[in-house]
């Protein structure tokens, strides 16, 4: 699924506003569809343990290019 401009803006707003619960939900949906911007945000949430708790394996899944 291609992320629309509206989804991109919404995801970035949620992340910047530290609304991590909603950012996590939207990023998960979009990242699992292969969206690189959402993968980056989701990877960072896992890498730094924001909202979801520290999980370096999941962080690597979304941050490392396969």
Image (tube, helix red, strand yellow):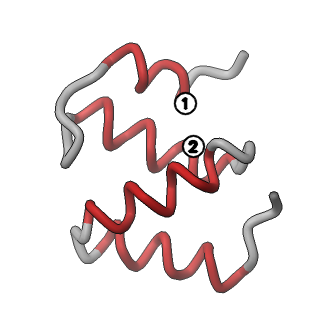
Circle 1: element type: helix
- Asked where in the image residue 18 lies, by quadrant, the reply is bottom left
Count of marks overlaid on the render: 2
Taking the view exactly as shown, the residue that stands out farthest to the bottom is: 6
Label 2: few (<14), some (14–19) or many (≥20) C-alpha neighbours in 10 Å: many
**Mark found first going from the N terminus, 1 or 2:** 2
Compared with 33, 2 (above or below) is: below
Taking the image as shown, residue 21 lies to the left or right of residue 61, namely left
Quarter of the image with the C terminus is top right
Relative to 62, say whether 12 is above or below: below
- Residue 21 lies left or right of residue 25; in this view the side is left
- Tell me the quarter of the picture where residue 46 sits: top left
Q: Is residue 28 above or below residue 13?
A: above
Quarter of the image that includes the N terminus: bottom right
Q: Secondary structure at mark 2?
A: helix
- The reply to whether the C-beta atoms of the residues labelled 1 and 2 are less than 8 Å apart is yes
Residue 11: x %, y % from top left = 49, 71
Left or right relative to 5: residue 55 = left
Image height of 39 relative to 17, above or below: above
Q: Would you identify the image quadrant in which residue 7 lies?
A: bottom right
* Residue 11 tag number: none
Q: How many residues crowd around disc 1 within 10 Å: few (fewer than 14), some, or many (20 or more)?
A: many
Residue pictured at 65% horizontal, 42% vertical: 32
Q: Position of residue 21 (x, y in %)?
A: 27, 62
Residue at image position (38%, 64%) is 23
Residue ID at (68%, 46%): 36
- Mark sitting on residue 39: 2
Q: Position of residue 10 (x, y in %)?
A: 50, 80
Q: Dot 1 corresponds to which residue? A: 62
Q: CA distance from mark 1 to mark 2?
A: 5 Å
State the image coordinates of residue 16 (x, y, percent, origin top left): 31, 71
């Amino acid at each position: 699924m291609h992320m629309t401009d509206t989804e991109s803006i919404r995801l970035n707003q949620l992340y910047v506003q530290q609304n991590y619960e909603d950012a996590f939900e939207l990023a998960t949906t979009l990242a699992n569809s292969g969206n690189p911007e959402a993968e980056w945000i989701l990877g960072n949430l896992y890498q730094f343990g924001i909202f979801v708790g520290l999980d370096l394996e999941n962080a690597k899944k979304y941050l490392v290019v396969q």
